[in-house]
Image (cartoon, helix red, strand yellow):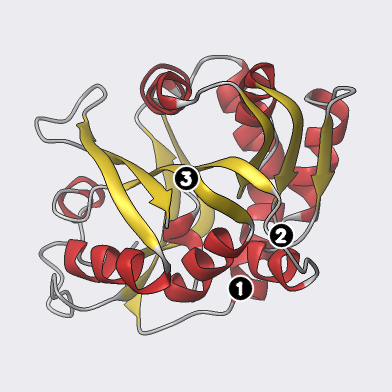
Amino acid sequence: MISLKRSKSLSRITREWDAIAALRERQIATGRDHSANFVLAPAILGELKDVECLVDIGCGTGWLTSRAAFSARATVGIDPSRESIAIAEVEHGGDSIIYSAESVENYARRRSRPKFDAAISNMAASSAPDLEGFFAASRRILRIDGSLILTIPHPCFWPLYWGYASNPKFSYERSFAVEGEFKIRKQATDMLTTHFHHSLERYFSIFGKVGFSVDSLRELYGRGFAFPRFMLIVLRAV
């Protein structure tokens, strides 16, 4: 069952991802999650150029971090879920990869100057209770002209896919915390996760406000749904 709320704390959302971390690693490692392996990852990696220093913001269990690390001399993966980071360090480590169990906001506060040439972020912005804070922190850790390659649920069609577009509380232009049992096309679960619905206008107004310009945008489909399910957005730090 899905419920819509006005807000939810990062600590509560982090506990949800701690609980589901091992399952998410199995779903991706076995290929059960088709969208992660064959839609989202190729889209992000296809935009990534060779860089000196790369960060994966909201890296989860590190499955994409380790693939992206081939394009960088040094890579950092950050995620507030300690259980996810523990898996990342065991399953997706490497000499050039460092993982840190913290939010991007905390990570940015601890650094006095931009460090990274590029950032990737797969479906992480939609789990951030403070969307502007998430993107402002992401901008602070990027050098001028650095790129942020991110994917998000498609705001126009994700509510249809998850089934809450018809909820009487739902209004496209408003932001909501959406609680529901986590699912992928090939597997439903009884494990609660939360993502945030935001309109496209809200996303794009924040991009400009915190110091990003938009380089490109693509709609991504995947299997089993007639409409685009995700969006790939490439931002440039200005």
Which of the two discs, 1 and 2, labels the residue nearer the N terminus?
A: 1
Q: Position of residue 163 (x, y in %)?
A: 20, 54
Q: Residue at x 28, y 76 (%)?
A: 175
Nearer-the-camera pick, 133 or 84: 133
Q: Earlier in the sequence, mark 2 or mark 3?
A: 2
Q: Which disc is residue 148 wearing? A: 3
Q: Residue at x 32, y 55 (%)?
A: 213
Describe the element under mark 1 as helix, strand or loop: helix
Residue that carries the numbered disc 2 in the rendered image: 80
The amino acid pointed to by label 1 is Leu
Q: Quadrant of the C terminus?
A: bottom left
Cβ atoms under marks 2 and 3 closer than 8 Å: no
Q: Residue at x 34, y 64 (%)?
A: 207
The CA distance from mark 2 to mark 3 is 19 Å
Q: How many marks?
A: 3
Q: Residues within 10 Å of mark 3 (few under 14, many from 20)?
A: many
Give the number of the disc on residue 10: 1
Q: Position of residue 63 (x, y in %)?
A: 65, 27
Residue 197 appears anywhere in the view: no
Disc on the earlier residue, 3 or 1 = 1
Q: Is residue 2 above or below residue 65?
A: below
Distance CA(mark 3)–CA(mark 1): 22 Å
Q: Are the residues tagged 1 and 2 within 8 Å (C-beta)?
A: yes
| 9 horizontally vs 237: left or right | right
Q: Amino acid at mark 2?
A: Pro
Amino acid carrying mark 3 in the image:
Leu
